Amino acid sequence: MEQTRVDSQAGCLGSVKYQKLLLQESESEEEEEEEDETESGSQEEEEEEDEMKTVLFLDSGHQRALQVNPAQNWQSRTKAWAGILSALLLLGLSFYLAARQLRPRGASNQDQEMAAPKIQSLDHHTSGHHHSPGIYPHGVVISESDTCSILGRDLLLAGGNVVDAGVGTALCLALVHPHETGLGAVFWALFHNSSSNQTMALMPAPAQDLAPGLGMPGALPALHLLHRNLGHLPWSQLLAATIALAQEGFSIDQALAEALAERDAAGQATGLCPLLCHPNGTVLGQGTHVTNLGLAAVLRRAAQAPETDDQFLSALLHPLADDLFLEEPLQGIMPTLEPALRLALPQGLLFTTPSPTAGELLLKVLRNPLKAGGLTSDPCPGFLAAAQDAYSRVTPAAPVGSILAAMDSEGSVLLLASSLNSTFGSGWLSPSTGILLSDFVGGSQIASWACPALLCCGPEDDVLALAASGGSSAPLAIAKTLLSYLALQQPLPNAITQPLLQIQLGSNGAPRSCRKTPPKTGAPNPEALLLVTTHADHVRATGVPVSSYPSRGH
């Protein structure tokens, strides 16, 4: 079953496939099989009953004979009891099948739809088909928070597509990982529609000053733009779980606790209070329960805001203006959806985000080593020369804070990357909204090391998508994974967890050396990145470090 969403502003994208449980089709097939089984069962029952009548009649004769002659053959009595038990079993089976057929279909469809995930899971695994960790038959979400990966997975189960799942996961991360992302962050994305083979990039607006040292928040306009053009579920449904989590509270995980401790050690935690501090001013530790009622209120207003971008953004900007004592109405520049950059390779088409992200740099360093398309004993010389030349031309760029991916088994995928520019951004917490603003300022395009990449449309028709976090190492982490996989034929997921190529950076962040080495057991890839890929009608998710990128799928 395929559902499409037609939007006047996304006509060039074609139809979007949505990952839903194929319940109605499987129901009708099950019902037809049950009807066939019932008909064949009825015929077998009639034959069995005829046979049983003969057996019982003969047994009755045997019973009369036994009364006359107690020494009659004992086997005839055994046959009689076996026949009686068989008749009772057939009678019980008939009542069961009749009850299944007489069940009201209208009343049962809803119950079965609610139970669909359990039904499919049981059918899949009781048949002896088991999956390795990170491999799922229908769809997956992978992020830096298990809570948020579960939230995204649940949106897939609710009938959402990968855009719905990715947007919902990003909103959750904005709450639970304020050191890396948030409603004050800027977002980049790469979306691939498997049904139309269209690939688009989400690009943020140029940096704007909300106030001195404080950047204009860009998350809600960006995520809303993605959903309005490419999503399926109601917008309010994507916000509901994060609103509830902000109201009821969440536990600080290890990643946030470590970031808070580092901030406190540097004497820069004052601006994070009172939200992330104890009453005595010390920062909260791992496992502490936190609520963010201000953020919940902002998301509630955003869920009810009109569809127009300017009115939608005002749901957030008005309370921020009050906090900052700004008299003039704030005006935000909207993000855009643009065609993705593309590099044709013998192995397929490689897509990434356009300038001023590092996507163009990524394609430059991969073009020569991969253009031949064949195997190579050592791609390092060509790669290192291209990388050093490309890095010598780049300007300082913002690091990538948070990454996530959502993918279905048909190959539709959303990669999202976001940044506050610095850890905890500006370090200023808005009292009324519970939002940490970024420190992206100025009037130019935001240069970033973000370069989510996607390889598709090759001979094997699989889709592979990668995203990396960090600074100048992010494009190189993606590049060496692709070279290990495509040029050196290293299998997945080893190409991401223990790539054959090792790259060292110089003091300026540019690559200094490259060498091919055999993978070392217990020596995982030091860069943080994630991979999702389709193969054999399944989807695989892998993250590095593994413990930092939990995946959830169905």
Image (cartoon, helix red, strand yellow):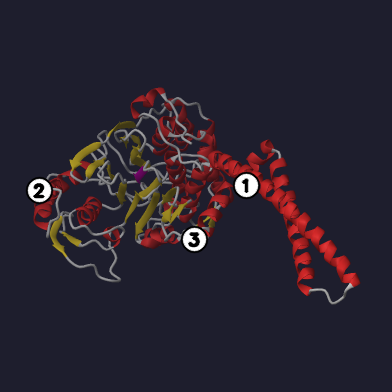
The answer to whether residue 415 is magenta is: yes
| Magenta residues, dominant SS class | strand
Residue 476 pos. (x, y %): 21, 53
Q: Is residue 304 above or below residue 272?
A: above
Residue 265 pos. (x, y %): 37, 63
The front one of 521 and 290 is 521
Residue 248 disc label: none
Task: Give the residue at mark 3.
Answer: 128
Name the element at disc 3.
loop
Q: Is residue 60 above or below residue 442?
A: below
Name the element at disc 1.
helix
Q: Amino acid at mark 3?
A: Gly
The residue at the point 61 percent across, 43 percent down is 36
Q: Amino acid at mark 1?
A: Glu
The residue at the point 48 percent across, 36 percent down is 1
Badge 2: how crowded within 10 Å, few (<14), some, or many (20+)?
Answer: some
Q: Which residues are magenta?
A: 414-418
Badge 3: how crowded within 10 Å, few (<14), some, or many (20+)?
Answer: few
Task: Give the residue at mark 2.
Answer: 389
Residue 400 pos. (x, y %): 31, 49
